[in-house]
Amino acid sequence: MAGKRKVDPHAMRAAVAAVLPWLDGGDQPARPVLAEAVRSTLRTLEQTAPGHTVEVRVPPFAAIQCIEGLRHTRGTPPNVIETDPKTWLELATGRLSFTDAVADGRLSASGTRADLTTLLPLVRF
């Protein structure tokens, strides 16, 4: 992760705290607030499980590569996880399990290594 800025856990926690009302059924936060929560949690995952085996996509805000193993360099990665911002933040905060998100069709996971069960949640409130 040379050249990448470390995520301040307090800043990440504050960014996620700002979107908790939305996760609990309130109004969607402003786009910059939502973007910061998604990006900071994805960067935290990237730091927690460094590597290039799995690509985690949360459009339209960010995509990261994580988990040690074979490095992917061209074309579509063999292990991809993709979901929407709300589902991602529910996973990151432990409000939703990875297994339930897949079963409910709220998250797509392709590839034998596309499983974040042991890495989530990233923060609890």
Image: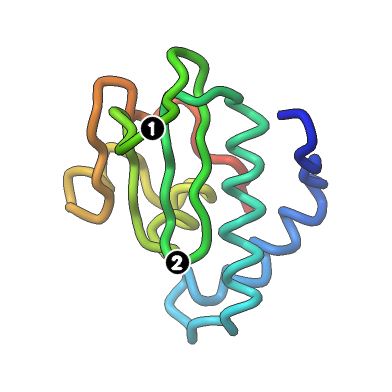
Which residue is drawn at the image coordinates 49% and 82% (left, top)? Answer: 28
* Residue 79 vertical placement versus 4 (above, below): above
Query: Could you tell me the amino acid type at mark 1?
Result: Arg
For the N terminus, the quadrant is top right
C-alpha span from label 2 to label 1 = 21 Å
* Label 1 environment density (alpha carbons within 10 Å; few <14, some 14–19, many ≥20): few
* Label 2 environment density (alpha carbons within 10 Å; few <14, some 14–19, many ≥20): few
Q: Quadrant of residue 51?
A: top right
Is 33 on the left-hand or right-hand side of 84?
A: right
Is 75 on the left-hand or right-hand side of 34?
A: left
In the rendering, at what x and y percent does residue 102 appear? 23, 44
> Which residue is disc 1 drawn over?
74
Is 21 on the left-hand or right-hand side of 77?
A: right
The answer to which of 22 and 112 lies nearer the viewer is 112
* N-terminal label among 2 and 1: 2
The answer to which of 18 and 79 lies nearer the viewer is 79
In the rendering, at what x and y percent does residue 86 appear? 42, 65
Q: Quadrant of residue 99?
A: top left
In the rendering, at what x and y percent does residue 38 appear? 56, 59
The answer to which of 106 and 62 lies nearer the viewer is 62
Q: Quadrant of residue 29?
A: bottom right
> Which residue is disc 2 drawn over?
60
Q: Name the colouring of the figure.
A: rainbow
Which residue is drawn at the image coordinates 50% and 26% (left, top)? Answer: 52
Find numbered disc 1 in the image and state the secondary structure of the residue it sits on: loop
Which residue is drawn at the image coordinates 39% and 30% (left, top)? Answer: 117
Which residue is drawn at the image coordinates 36% and 42% (left, top)? Answer: 97
Query: Could you tell me the amino acid type at mark 2?
Result: Pro
Find numbered disc 2 in the image and state the secondary structure of the residue it sits on: loop
Q: Are marks 2 and 1 in contact (CB under 8 Å)?
A: no
